[in-house]
Structure formats: C-alpha cells, structure tokens
C-alpha cells in the first residue's frame, strides 16, 4: 500500500487540473459529450485497459484492467453529469455555462475514478483479478446507471461486486462513512396533468375547476404518508411545481403538477405510488376533470450489501485510521441510481468527507455554491485502490498479491 500512496500523490496535481476543467464545463444528463471525450482520451493513455465507449446512449464508458486474467471482477463506478443549476460561486474555474453546474460533485467522482485507473494500472500484474472502471451518464435524471446495465456493463467480463462513493459535505476530509443496508431512498419523480372545462371565473358552476381539484389533491396527498403507511417506514411525498392559469377572472383548462415520492423500502414505495394514483383518480372523479399521471425514471432503494459495506469500512480503518470511519449514520431520503447496480450484484456506496479541516459549514449538495473539495481526491482514490485490492485478494487467488 505505500506504493499506492506514492503513485496517488504523484498524479494529484494533474487530477486537480482535470477536475477544474470538468467543473468549468458541466454537462447534464445524457449530454456529457465533452466530459466523456476527456475521460476516453485519458483512459486511452493508460496501458492495459480494454475500453468500451458509446454506452448508455453515447456517453457511457467501461474500461477493464486485466480483462483476460482469471479471477474475480470488481466494478468501480463514477457518475459524470451536472445539474441544471446556475453556479453562484466565485471560483476561478466556476461554470462557464449559464444554468448548469457540478453541484453534486460528479466532477470529483469522475476525476477520482480516472485517478484510480491510472494508479491500479501500474500494479496490474499484482492484482489477482479484473477491475472494471464504469463512467456513467445521467445519475441525476434519466437512470444512466440502469442504461449502462442494459448495455451489458455487468457482463463481459462478469462483474462480481460493485463499489462507488459520494463526496459528502457533512463530514471532514479524510473521513468516510460506510453503512450496511438501505442508505438512500427509492425515488419516483412524477408529473400530473389536470384538464377540465375552463371558463369565466364568475360562473364556476359552468366549468370543471381543475385548480380546486389540484389544490385538494396536493393537500390530501399528505394523508398518504400520515394515515396509510406505517409511521416507522419512512416515506416523503413532495409536490414541487404547479403551473396553471394566467388571468384573475378565468378558470383555466389545464394544470401541471410535478413532484417526487421517496421511500426507504420497496414495499412502502410501491404502496405510496399506488395510493397517489388512487387519490388522483378519486379527486378527478369528484371534480369531473381528467387527470393523467406519469412516473419518470423510478430509482430503487440503495441497499448496501453487508459484507461489501464492512469491506469498505475495514479498508478505511487500515488506510485512514479507525477513528476516521463511521459505520453508523442515518439513511437519507435522497435518491441514487447506483441502486440499480446494487440490485444485480453485491455492492456498497460509501461517503467521502468534503468538509475542510476547521470548517463548521460547507455548502450542501445541489447548492449553487457547492464545490467538490480537491483535498478529498487522495482519500477517495486511496479507498478505491484499497477496496479493489482487498476484494480481489479475498475473493480470488491471492498468491503474489499485495496485502493491505
Ligand atoms: Zn445529486
Ligand atoms: Zn450525486
């Protein structure tokens, strides 16, 4: 492992430049063309990688180290997409694109995975198996991870386990969190369109008032969580957008709602979705209006495999110190499409601290002033290298491998 550390330290300055470049040029879901091009060009300079590109609609990349070597295959994953948020930081490398920014730190994830590929390639002959580096599009919206799996990223060679990390602004740099079980929620974004007979505001009895229907529906939705689902089974239903009407004296004909359903168990998630549909249909019938509901990119609950989460924690204890590893941390109602990987193979996502030493506050994920902390890059790469090494040496023929 000292060799890993030296190899990581040698490339950190270049990686910081690489991340700043990605940060300045954010691209949202399925449009990560420049980002994917930069990653592909960098991967091509690394010896020993078997590279597949044009995955998941064009921008996804998978690169396998030791593709022909016997032994297990471990997948390490990063997401590349940015968010439709206007950056408000005054960083010298702030977003150059209005309305788009890396507010979730995926520029950092991509950079760290690339750095890991560069380091592990130097030790390929000592790894008792294969490592697949997976760069996916569209984590924030569009289920890019699911598309990668549909395009075969878990096969050829077959993947035995998958790991990913997320930069985490709530803990200091140099620390990690690795927790087994459900850590992030199932998330089902929805869009609803009410349509009805509009008309003069003075004669509502001659209309079918979609606004009153929509308002009652939004209010009644909260009864699903409080009266239909076990209080110990977390569910959140939030309506986040309402668009209808433009005049003071016209009852409009259409009203659009947007929102999201979140749950920490698949059962509660399914129940909540069915109840939203039922409440909607009942409201529509009561008000004699039409209501159409559409769910988009439904993400499952992210469930960390117990053994994988413990492997991450143990690697962290050895590399960072026992006091730097948290194995208890409350789950979050945020969603994460790494959950699709975890559905297919034993997997764990861990969190890597971003808070600078001495700071008590750090802008949260999706905040217009958020920035992935460069000081976290060595920790994340060290963890990825250690995890790959540990997984392969404990699941395959470890003769000649490094011990960490
Ligand atoms: Zn995000
Ligand atoms: Zn994210």
Image (cartoon, grey):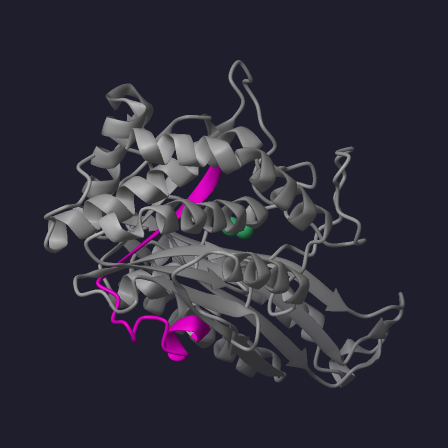
Residue 216 drawn at (x, y percent): 59, 64
The region drawn magenta spans 147-168
The quarter of the picture where residue 257 lies is bottom right
Q: Nearer the viewer, residue 143 or 77?
A: 77
Does residue 337 lie above or below 147 as drawn?
above
Q: Is residue 329 left or right of residue 151?
A: left
Q: How many marks?
A: 0
Measuring 63% from the left and 71% from the top, which residue is drawn there? 213
Residue 167 within the magenta-colored segment of the rendering: yes
Q: Is residue 101 left or right of residue 226?
A: right
Extreme-top residue of the structure: 358
Residue at the (49%, 33%) spot, across then down? 10
163 sits to left or right of 45: left
Q: What residue appears at the point 52 percent right and 26 percent down from the top-left corner?
A: 355
294 to 14, vertically: above or below:
below
Question: Where is 283 relative to 290, above or below?
Answer: above
- Tell me residue 93's x, y (percent): 74, 40
- Near-viewer residue (149 or 130): 130
The N terminus lies in which quarter of the figure?
top left
Residue 252's spot in the image, x, y percent? 79, 76
Residue 357 rendering spot, x and y as whole percentages: 51, 17
Question: What residue do we see at 65% from left, 40% from top?
Answer: 17
Q: Quadrant of residue 248?
A: bottom right
């Amino acid at each position: 492992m000292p060799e890993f550390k030296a190899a990581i330290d040698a490339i950190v300055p270049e990686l910081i430049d690489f991340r700043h470049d990605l940060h300045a040029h954010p691209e949202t879901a399925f449009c990560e063309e420049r980002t994917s091009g930069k990653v592909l060009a960098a991967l091509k300079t690394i010896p020993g990688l078997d590279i597949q590109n044009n995955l998941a609609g064009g921008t996804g990349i998978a690169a396998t180290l030791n593709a022909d070597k016997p032994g297990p295959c471990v997948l390490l994953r990063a997401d590349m997409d940015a968010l439709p948020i206007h950056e408000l930081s005054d960083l010298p490398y702030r977003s150059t694109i209005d309305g788009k920014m890396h507010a979730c730190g995926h520029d950092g994830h991509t950079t760290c995975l690339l750095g890991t590929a560069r380091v592990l390639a130097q030790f390929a002959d000592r790894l008792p198996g294969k490592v697949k580096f997976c760069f996916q599009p569209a984590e924030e919206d569009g289920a890019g991870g699911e598309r990668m799996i549909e395009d075969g990223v878990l096969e050829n060679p077959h993947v035995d386990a998958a790991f990913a990390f997320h930069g985490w602004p709530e803990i200091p740099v140099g620390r990690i969190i690795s927790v087994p079980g459900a850590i992030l929620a199932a998330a089902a974004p929805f869009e609803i369109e009410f349509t009805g007979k509009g008309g003069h505001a003075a004669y509502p009895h001659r209309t079918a008032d979609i606004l009153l229907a929509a308002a009652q529906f939004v209010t009644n939705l909260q009864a699903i969580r409080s009266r239909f689902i076990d209080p110990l089974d977390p569910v959140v239903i939030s309506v986040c957008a309402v668009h209808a009407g433009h005049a003071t004296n016209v009852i409009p004909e259409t009203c659009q709602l947007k929102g999201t359903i979140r749950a920490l168990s698949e059962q509660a998630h399914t129940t909540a979705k069915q109840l939203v549909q039922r409440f909607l249909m009942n409201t529509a019938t009561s008000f004699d209006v039409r209501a159409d509901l559409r769910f988009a990119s439904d993400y499952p609950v992210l469930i960390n495999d117990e053994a994988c989460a413990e492997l991450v924690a143990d690697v962290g204890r050895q590399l960072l110190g026992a006091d730097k590893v948290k194995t208890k941390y409350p789950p979050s109602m945020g969603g994460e499409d790494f959950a699709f990987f975890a559905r297919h193979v034993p997997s764990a996502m861990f969190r890597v601290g971003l808070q600078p030493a001495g700071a008590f506050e750090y802008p949260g994920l999706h905040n217009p002033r958020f920035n992935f902390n460069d000081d976290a890059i060595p920790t994340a790469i060290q963890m990825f290298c250690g995890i790959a090494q540990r997984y392969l040496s404990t699941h395959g023929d470890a003769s000649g491998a490094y011990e960490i």
